[in-house]
Amino acid sequence: MLARINDNWGLFNPWRTVNDLQREFWNLFEDLGDSVNRYRPGYPRLTIDEDDKTVKVSVALPGYNKDQIDVEVLGDFLTVSAERLEPDLEEEERYLHRERSFGKFQESIKLPAQVQSAKSNAKYINGILEITLPKADSEKPRSIKVINS
Amino acid sequence: MSENNKTEQTMEYIDFAPPSDVIENDHVIRLAMDMPGVSNDNLSVDLDDGILKVTADTSLDRNGKRVRYKRSFQVTDQIDANKITAKVCSGVLEVVMPKAEAAKVRKIQVAVE
């Protein structure tokens, strides 16, 4: 169960202001030490960043083929699905040790803002999928002039 | 430049042990590690006194700390240390360690008298 929670830690981010809570949650795990930590994947799977103009999502997908990665935006929901197949062993090869997982990966997250899906792009570099989503105009900060009446 | 140095000094790291597979046949031992965010430039693989040490820096951040991968393996002395090769492809490191001649399985014919 822990393994599943940790592998999908983006699931803990369905609301806009929950980032800090999430941070605390992970610090808690770090404080508890290895007895709890050992089931988490060896890397952060999903991170979300935003500034005034864009939302950036990066998903760690090591060893995937870029043609087997699908990215979909519907409203302010982003869905990433991907699959990596278990490598075939050559004849006479055998596993001495196994930790890596294979198969399907799917994650849906609620983005922190409305985005312009048509202007979004995704790149796959060094096993990391980087998705850049420009924010919708309505989300950009607008300064309002104060005038004398 | 001075500002650059400053950020490097204050950079905090968080270490991860990447998940690894070890595969063996009669001639080689292969090690595969999931290390997203690592390229050939920021990776080091060392074999010292029977310990294979893998260290890699990434550009990933978690909780404001830079993600770094670290893992060590004890390897048998039957590895030919001069012939070890390593490469990274799409965030997966593959280390190929050929076995020394002495360690290879040799079939011995049973003679019938």
Image (spheres, coloured by chain):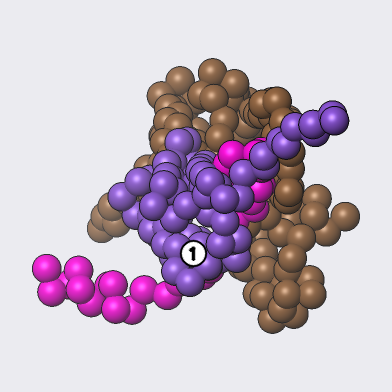
Chain colours: A brown, B purple
Give the residue at the far front of this rendering.
B113
Asked whether residue B12 is drawn in magenta, I would say yes
Among the 4 quarters of the image, the one containing residue A122: top left
Q: Can residue A45 be seen in this view?
A: no
Q: State the extent of the magenta-drawn residues as a range.
A: B1-30
Residue ID at (80%, 55%): A3
Q: Is residue B37 above or below residue A122?
A: below
Does residue A1 appear to the left or right of B13 in the view shown?
A: right
| Chain ID at mark 1 | B
Assign a secondary structure to mark 1.
Answer: strand
Asked whether residue A67 is drawn in magenta, I would say no
**Residue holding disc 1:** B53
Viewer-proximal residue among A96 and B98: B98
Picture residue at 45% right of the left edge, 20% below the top? A118
The residue shown at (67%, 26%) is: A90
**Left or right, residue A146 beside residue B27:** left
Residue at (76, 60) in percent of width and height: A39
Q: Can residue A87 be seen in this view?
A: yes
